[in-house]
Image: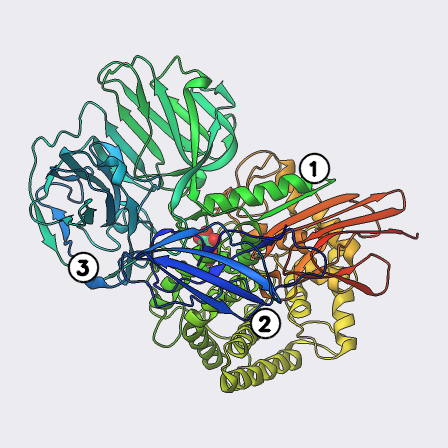
Amino acid sequence: MTTVTPVRFEYGEPRIGIGTGSPRLSWRITDADEGWRFDACEIECVRDGTTESVIVASGEQVFVPWPFAPLRSRECARVRVRVATGESWTPFSEPSSIEAGLLEQEAWVARWISPIGLGGMDDGAPWLFRDVELERKPVKARLYVSARGLYEFTINGIRVGDEVLTPGWTAYEHRVRYQTYDVAELMQVGRVRLGALLGNGWFRGQLVAPGNRSSYGDRLALIAQLELTFADGSTQTVSTDEAWRAAESPIMFDDFYDGQRTDLRRSLDGLGAGGVDVVACDARLVAPRGPGIRVTETVPAQRILTTPSGRTVVDFGQNLVGWVRVKVGDGRAGQRVVIRHAEVLEHGEVGVRPLRSAKATSEYILSGGSCEVLQPTFTFNGFRYAEVEGLPDLQSGDVDALVIGSGLERTGWFESSHPGVNRLHENIVWSMRGNFVGVPTDCPQRDERLGWTGDIQVFAPTASFLFDTAGFLSDWLCDLASEQKDDGGVPYVIPDVLRDPDPAAAGWSDAATLVPEAVYRATGDVGVLARQYRSMCAWADKVLALSGSSGLWDTGFQFGDWLDPTAPPEDAARAQAAPGVVATAYAVRTLGAVADAAEVLGERGDAANYRAHERRVREAFARAYVGPEGRLVSDCQTVYALALCGDLLGTEAQRAGAGSRLAELVIAADATVSTGFLGTPLILDALTMSGHADLAYAMLLQTKCPSWLYAVSMGATTVWERWDSMLPDGTINPGSMTSFNHYAYGAVADWLHRAIGGITALEPGYRRIRVRPEVGSGRSLTYARARHASPYGDIDVSWRIDDDRFALEIDVPYGVTAEVWMPEAGGTWVVQHGKHEFRRTLGG
Ligand code: BGC
């Protein structure tokens, strides 16, 4: 029977405390018969005991506008949907509920409070608390809370919610995120103790460089509003104010880069308590747009080894992000346990040099209790290995690693007949998980961990296939827009803690236009384009100003094709690709993306204007950089990739010439990669589209350095920052940029999903797709499968070659139309929802 799945509101999370009164609705249709289509839907909403229903004459099912009066702050609604073809209706979906957060700043009666006399810059984490006497148990209890710094909130000693590192990182000067919790279960008659530990986190801990603290201020602060509703309808609100008290806590020191020191002999008893005062904060409190940071997996210790120098090291078998948890059965009071983290071993010892100044050390002083669990609260690490000092009898069953990250829903999978390629894909997923921690970061381990715009710009299409990133990236894009310069310049990191006064670099600042485009393409979310539109135009205007009348953006600072394999260890920007050529190619992309967005949003004048500029700059590129036979001024893999993928080559003959020249370069390099951050996402596409799919396969499967599978052959479990982060002799690259967990080169997975897996979105949100697996003539792969949980439902494509028999199976969800191409067959088949099989015999 055709069924409508429960409605999803906006980006799925949060369900309590959503930041809009008009959440858009999405649903999926399952088990529809072939040929069936709906042309109307009925949306029913129950709120305040009244039921309202609206019939919409449309076949839309993704981001359908809220058809009722907006929800007010705190208001709840239950929504269900049914759809019809003609007069025949499906049953209603199961109802889904939603509750609005505090939608106006005036809904906050709580004040920001900060401890006096403790919790200073060089003190441990302060604890703020107050007691409330309850005569009755409330029927409803909501806690709205945020911090300048990090908070961990408890009620009668029990942690509230399952998020960590709350409230997360935003452009704190402009927007501070708050969380909403249902805390009814934690309420009891009698004394209720509300308490919050405050940590330094991004607000006040080290950021950017060693010793650089207080990026946002030097006083930690808390804001909390507990709203209780009783059975008779009466309410009570308890808020942060001068009545709260402050005390010291067991956390003596906390910092993201350096780690945490915890003295478990101290308890949270409120002793030595001091006062708080109310502090001012101009930033807006905003609800989250996506999932919070959570513990997403527990990884057991794989083995415990003793290093050549006699140290005890735990190997978790996987480079991951989070922290180590150790259970100590019978520690002595005062016993010191120290845990150091590292991503790799070098000469059999933990290799901490890539961490640069970050101490990445958790230290505990045991209380001597009979069973102590050691884990940090306000720090995280990127590691595969943990060196443990102070627990000589450590057994592997006593220790595990808790993986943390933004709780994104997984939406993409890939597998093939090649174990190395499968491991590469796994590594890319792990690098994404480790670097989607509140904001999209470059790396999770050293003294950096920043929201570098270039990294996410190249990785966004991959990310949006693998996980549902729409809420997460939309939220981050709000920060980008709020930190953009008046002249349109876009900072290199968001949130902008570098604070360059005039930031504009190709590939990095282009995140302003290309990340919204990637989100829109993956999800069909017009809202993200509408919200970012002004920011997108501002960046395009800045690009126009920088490229001037020549149309060539060939002046000023550039990161260029960052970290191409020829870059010397200490000069990551020195690449083969000429910076001006790269920047001009990006100018065309940005102008095109803004013209596209303007068309979608119905901004016709802008669309024509940016389209004309796109054309002008494209022609300028061809005139200045492309020779008559398609030879490019900057004769290297990255520049051919940019020119071919960006359609920058002028005539057909020039395009063909450029394709051949790229092939020559790749053959001369023995199919090793010679691209950096900006060429890497495109190189295999450029080879495929110019008729050299076999070379693309050869490059993918190359194991000699530099290549993707070189790292895999060296035992990598995440994507490395540079092609040779670890040198063939097992020593660590001497350069200062030597992370073992950077997702940028993992952007190749986008090609795996499209070209090998065969799934390409032709229309936003996968409304229309092309299924065209590229099998290559070498038969290097005999099987591949890609799956994507699109907004309409699961798309599943797999193919297999047995001798010369090629078989393709696809499963298409309701709402999606697929154009299917078979290798060596002219023409396409167009199919709708359902399972389909295609077979043919391959020649040659
Ligand atoms: C980061 C990169 C980033 C780059 C910008 C590095 O330190 O780790 O991933 O994009 O700087 O140049």
User: Dots 1 and 3: beta carbons under 8 Å?
Assistant: no
Residue 449 makes an appearance in the image: yes
Residue position for label 3 = 281
User: Dots 3 and 2: beta carbons under 8 Å?
Assistant: no
Query: Relative to 361, is 66 on the left or the right?
Result: right
Question: Front-most of 721 and 298?
Answer: 298
Secondary structure under badge 3? loop
Give the residue displayed 41% in from the left and 25% down from the top: 387
**Nearest to N terminus: mark 3 or mark 2:** 3
Residue 419 is marked as 1
- Residue 528 in the image, given as x and y percentages of width and height: 46, 66
Secondary structure under badge 2? helix
As displayed, is residue 607 above or below residue 515? below
**Nearest to N terminus: mark 1 or mark 3:** 3
Mark 1 vs mark 2, CA separation in Å = 35 Å
User: Dots 1 and 2: beta carbons under 8 Å?
Assistant: no
Q: Residues within 10 Å of mark 1 (few under 14, many from 20)?
A: few
As displayed, is residue 130 above or below residue 833? above
Q: Which amino acid does label 1 sit on?
A: Pro
Question: Front-most of 62 and 84?
Answer: 84
Q: How many marks?
A: 3
Residue position for label 2 = 585
Q: Residues within 10 Å of mark 3 (few under 14, many from 20)?
A: some
Q: Which quadrant would residue 683 be assigned to in this image?
A: bottom right
Mark 1 vs mark 3, CA separation in Å = 53 Å
